[in-house]
Amino acid sequence: MTAGRPAGVHGVGLLSVAILVIMLGSCMKRAAAPPPPPPPETILAEAGNEPLQQSLFRGDQAVLTDQDIARILGTQLNLTDRHRMAILSLTPTSPWSEDLAEIETKNLDRLLDTLKSSPQLTEVLLLPSLLVPEKRTVPYLREAAARVQADLLFVYTARIFSFRRDRFLKSDEVHAQCLAESVLLDVRTGIVVHTGHATENIAMKKMPADLNFNETVARAQSDARGKALLALANSVKEYLASGAK
């Protein structure tokens, strides 16, 4: 007669087998882990060692296709047949006195006269306010310029800063700074052919004729703006004189 194993020993054996099965199953699951996720769909596959000639982001195609961008970058413009220019300011001015309004008028006249002195331009005009679109994006600006049959559109903006508290300034002096930027847009193609940037600084002292110090500040700002716009106009004139190629 064979003696049976104690019940406790039999239970321990079964428990050991169960633990072994669980450990083997866990190892198999880790070995069969899923592969890493593919790259986002918005990123195109690499083109190997070839130089990239297209966008890596699919969403860019909704704005400009790679073919359009290649055609734009490969275009060589000759602007010698562009003779009509329209002008648009993106920074409205609101002079609060008659004297300051006269200064702003002179600033605009000097801008126009400088551009009109370019031998290439036969007509320079301000873009009528009725034609200025609410959405001042390139397509809408091109349309507005085309309506007045302008070949070129000169767009500028001017930011004014004034400083009253400075260790080098007296109590009746003000320092004004104007940061002006401009773009020259070829209306036919929509390409920005020239960009300009000008910074002008004016230090001015309160005059007896000034109503108050605020008028002194406004006068300094107008003078700084006028000089900056004149610098932008001269930059465009020189660009056109260089052949505009």
Image (cartoon, helix red, strand yellow):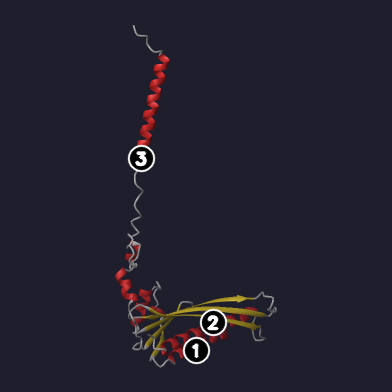
Q: Image quarter for residue 211?
A: bottom right
Who is closer to the viewer here, 140 or 235?
A: 235
Who is closer to the viewer here, 97 or 207?
A: 207
The mark lying in front, picked from 3 and 1, is 3
> Residue, x 44% and y 85% (percent of image)?
236
Separation of residues labelled 3 and 1 (CA atoms): 79 Å
Does residue 222 appear to the left or right of 33 in the view shown?
right
Amino acid type at image mark 2: Arg
Q: Image quarter for residue 13?
A: top left
Separation of residues labelled 2 and 1 (CA atoms): 12 Å
Q: Which is nearer the N-term, disc 3 or disc 2?
A: 3
Amino acid type at image mark 1: Arg
* Disc 3 secondary structure class: helix
> Residue, x 32% and y 73% (percent of image)?
70
Q: Circle 3 is placed at which residue position?
A: 31
Q: Circle 2 is placed at which residue position?
A: 225
* Disc 1 secondary structure class: helix
* Disc 2 secondary structure class: helix
Q: Which is nearer the N-term, disc 3 or disc 1?
A: 3
- Indicate which disc residue 78 carries: none
Q: Circle 1 is placed at which residue position?
A: 110
Q: Residues within 10 Å of mark 3 (few under 14, many from 20)?
A: few
Amino acid type at image mark 3: Ala
Separation of residues labelled 3 and 2 (CA atoms): 72 Å
Name of the residue lying farthest toward the top: 1
Quadrant where the N terminus sits is top left
